[in-house]
Image (cartoon, rainbow, N blue to C red):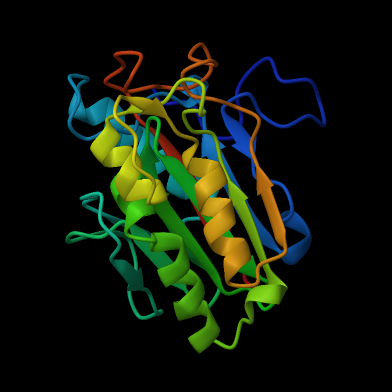
Amino acid sequence: MTAPIGATAGSPAGSPPDDREIAPGFATLGIAAFTTTRAAGSFGLQGQEPVGEVFGRWGALRESLGGARLATARQVHEATIIRHVPGWTGWLRADDADGHLAPLPATAMAVTIADCVPVFIAHRSGVCALLHSGWRGTAARITERAIEQLILERCPPGELVIHCGPAICGKCYEVSAEVYGALTGRTVDRPTNVDLRSLIADHARALGVREITISERCTRCDNDRFFSHRAGDAGRQLGVMMAHPQ
C-alpha cells in the first residue's frame, strides 16, 4: 500500500514531513513548492520497480494536492517550456519538454530529477513555472526563457521569486572541458567542476531577478536523503509546484 505523500510517519508534529523538502519563499504567495525525498520513494518511470507501486506514488501525490490536474512531460534535457491553461483534468504527460508554466492556479506541475536542478519560479499573482535544468538545459538558458515567458504574463523579473532545489553541488559535479566551455564560455584543457545552481542564479540576476535562494542540499553529498544519478541510483525524486486556488 502506498503511503500518502506528505504524511510520513515519524515526523514531529508541526514539522515538515520527511518525504519532501519545502522550497522557501512560496508558501506566503499561496504556492506549494517542494522536492520529494527518498522517503517518498522513486517516481521514475524507467526503473525496475513494479509499475503499480510507482503509479501508486503518483496517485498519492495528486491526492495530497487535492486531486489537482498534474502536468508532466517526457524530459529531453533541452529548453522547451509548455504553458498550461485550464480545461483538462487528470495527469498530463506531454511530449518533449523540460519546463512548465501555469498562468492560473490549480495546475500542479512536476519534473523528475536525480542531480539536475529543479528550478521553482513564481510571482505574487500566482503565475508560476517549474523547470528541469541539467547541464544542457542550463547551457540553453532554460531559466532565461522561462523568465522571458513570465514577462509576457505581466510578471516583471524584479517581482519574481526563484529557488534552485536539491541538486548535485559544484564540488561533486565534474564535467568535460567541452561541457564546461558550453556552460561558462571559458576554455579549459581538462575535466573541471562546475556549479549549475550558481550559473542558473547568475542567469536570473542578469535579467533583473533579485529574490533567489539555493538549497544547501546536494543530491550526491546527501545521498541518504536524495536519489543521485552520479551515485548510481536508478530512482528519481520530483520537483513539484502548484498555486492554490484563491
Q: Quadrant of residue 115?
A: top left
Q: Position of residue 74 (x, y in %)?
A: 21, 52
Q: Quadrant of residue 177?
A: top left
Is residue 245 left or right of 65 when viewed as pictured? right
* Left or right: where 213 falls relative to 236: right
- Which quadrant of the figure contains the N terminus? top left
Q: Nearer the viewer, residue 171 or 159?
A: 171
Percent coordinates x, y for residue 32 in the rendering: 62, 54
Farthest residue to the right: give it.
Answer: 14
x 64%, y 36%: residue: 215
- Please, is residue 204 above or below residue 201 in the view? below
Q: Could you tell me which residue is drawn at 52 percent across and 28 percent down?
A: 169
Residue 246 visible (yes or no): no
**Residue 36 visible in the snapshot:** yes
**Which quadrant holds the C terminus?**
bottom right
Expressed as whole percent of the image width and height from the top left, the position of residue 43 reads 34, 33
